[in-house]
Image: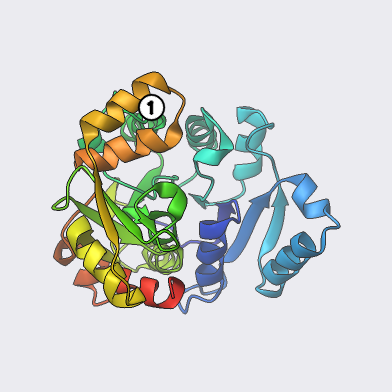
Amino acid sequence: MAPIKNILVIGAGELGNQVLRFLADHPQRQGAVVSVLLRPASIASTKPDKKSDIDTLRELGIQIVAGDVAQDTEQSLSSTFASHDTIISCMGFASGRGTQVKLTRAVLSAGIPRYIPWQFGIDYDIIGRGSAQELFDEQLDVRDLLRAQTQTSWAIVSTGIFTSFFFEPGFGVVDVHKGTVCALGGWENRVTLTTAEDIGKVTADIVFDEQDQFANKPIFIGGDTISYGDLAELVEKVTGKTVQKTVLKVDDAQAALATDPENNLLKYQIVWGQGRGVSWDLSATWNWKRGITMTTAEEWAAKNLV
């Protein structure tokens, strides 16, 4: 395949910023232009934090491209994408239903040689359709679109849950202030997690890998794979405090969802509680096989929980 010359990253949030930073600084970049798609309102914003973010991107030599994945038509996005040979979507579920399919169709209609879609998460093939979190069905729609064609080569980077989200009290697993750890499904259930920084680094490595990793299949990476039982011990070790341990059983979460069907948190908790497709052995990961050191759950907790 032809060398990479023009990369477009969609979005500059928690993950997008890390992907952009590692692409810009990558030793194998060899003059490739790195651009980011941002909403016109973000580019024109006079808010100090927004202006600072834009200035930082420009200092890294990153080009700014205007576009709105929610408002622009598929045809308009396709035209915006057309001058690039590699597109990486860092625009997650917050962008709304249908966005992942819309972006993928725009990429395919533009004939982009390489694509990394927003699939930075769990093993949606194993989870399958009809899970408690209906947003995950759209991830399978994206995979179906990609697998049904041969013009665009693609790579899916399966990361497990973002480490920061896993430890967020709002996810309902770890709450340091309350001194609680809740196991989803059971204490033996395991979770694979990876920090946004590590995902950014590995994604840049995948893009510039001389072996060309766009092999039309998922690539599994991971910073750590941990059981909820080990997690509780880890939190106690790091904080020096005994935690109160509870279990959210899948049946109880499903019953709660039946009375509150729009509760997104419960939908996520059910999927992780069922324990399918949310963890994998680190020894089988892309980064492990290449000797790439990543942040473990304990290392993240020691830096961020105390």
Does 11 appear above or below 222? above
Q: Is residue 114 visible?
A: no
Residue at x 46% of width, y 25% of height:
262
Is 33 on the left or on the right of 141, as rendered? right
Q: Quadrant of the C terminus?
A: bottom left
Dot 1 amino acid type: Glu
Residue at x 58% of width, y 55% of height:
13
| Quarter holding residue 62 | bottom right
Residue 232 at what x, y percent from top left? 25, 63
Residue at x 42% of width, y 38% of height:
265
Residue 137 at what x, y percent from top left? 36, 28
- Judging from the image, the colouring scheme is rainbow
Residue 227 at what x, y percent from top left? 19, 58
The residue indicated by pointer 1 is 134
Residue 112 at what x, y percent from top left? 50, 44
Is 88 on the left or on the right of 293, as rendered? right
Q: Quadrant of the N terminus?
A: bottom left
Q: Regarding mark 1 in the picture, which secondary structure is present there?
A: loop
| Quarter holding residue 296 | bottom left
Is 190 on the left or on the right of 22, as rendered? left
What is the crowding at mark 1: few (fewer than 14 residues within 10 Å), some, or many (at least 20)?
some
Q: How many marks?
A: 1
Q: Is residue 258 visible?
A: yes
The one nearer the camera, 180 or 97, is: 180
